[in-house]
Amino acid sequence: MRENGWAQAAALAMLLAAICAPRPSLAASEIAVGIYPSYPPLDMRDVATGELSGFDVELGNVLAHKLDATFRWSETSFAQLLPSLKTGRISLFLNGMNDTAVRREEIAFVDYLRSGSQFMTLFGRADELPDAQSLCGRKVAGSRGTNLPAQIAQWSKAYCEAAGKPAIDFLGADNNIDARSQLKQGRADAMAQDSLTIPYVQGQEAGVYATVGEPFDFVEMGIGVDKTDTDFQKRLAGALQGLIDDGSYASLLKKWGLPESSAIRRATINQAQ
């Protein structure tokens, strides 16, 4: 009986020690992070060095420092970001993905940016397409793997079809680069992409593009994380809030030419409307 008592006491002491011990640090670990570098100025490759670059990359690296970890960037296609996260190939992704109710059925989001959608055409066609309503019945290109198909369809119903005008003819593209290529080749009359990226695109190709109308359907973008790992979601949101509070977040927005309207004030989890 005495030996059993000592054994029970030792077991209890070990249990209490395990409960009270600090959680293992992430310092020695690498966190696999998915990225699809075709979304400047958020995600891209530096032309001179070929290295990953952009707002998301810099934000990710400072978040990793806050978490006392290292982010190992893993390049993949946009369509594979969710499957890669669900199968454990990556632990999170940073790629300007919209936080939507449908996607939240599969994963969770730590919201970190806001963006609207905006139409854009070639500068030489600005007079022909002076406002968004002039796009009714026209071909408009956009990335098929994003929310743009649904957003443009809804906009078309509200502002074209409801007014008795023909619907916008959506032309699916692989990504924003492909959509701009369709525009330049004359296969599309206009294109649509995130409003926060357009100033960068216009700066890279001065005098080539002109915006059509104002941004619409502002949404929150999220860092994709495992839906079941609520502890990591909270730690990631806390790290992001720390960067907002100390000014690092605002400095990165300014560095990459992102409009103030794209900033969030508070890091939230699955709070996009």
Image (tube, rainbow, N blue to C red):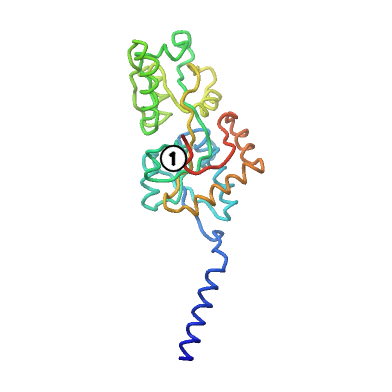
Q: How many numbered marks does the figure carry?
A: 1
Q: Quadrant of residue 254?
A: top right
Q: Is residue 161 above or below residue 152?
A: above
Q: Position of residue 131 (x, y in %)?
A: 46, 12
Q: Residue at x 57, y 36 (%)?
A: 264
Left or right side of 268 for 172: left
- Which SS class for mark 1? loop
Give, as a three-letter code, the residue at label 1: Tyr
Q: Position of residue 215 (x, y in %)?
A: 49, 22
Q: Is residue 133 above or below residue 243?
A: above
Tell which of 3 and 171 is nearer to you: 3
Tell which of 73 and 95 is nearer to you: 95
Determine the residue located farthest toward the bottom in the rendered image: 2
Left or right side of 130 for 258: right
Tell which of 10 and 80 is nearer to you: 10
The residue tagged 1 is 36
Left or right side of 159 for 208: right
Determine the residue located farthest toward the front in the rendered image: 1
Q: Position of residue 123 (x, y in %)?
A: 49, 14
User: Which quadrant of the figure contains the N terminus?
Assistant: bottom left
Q: Position of residue 166 (x, y in %)?
A: 32, 13
Determine the residue located farthest toward the top in the rendered image: 127
Q: Residues within 10 Å of mark 1 (few under 14, many from 20)?
A: many
Tell which of 237 and 259 is nearer to you: 237
Q: Quadrant of residue 129?
A: top left
Q: Quadrant of residue 148?
A: top left
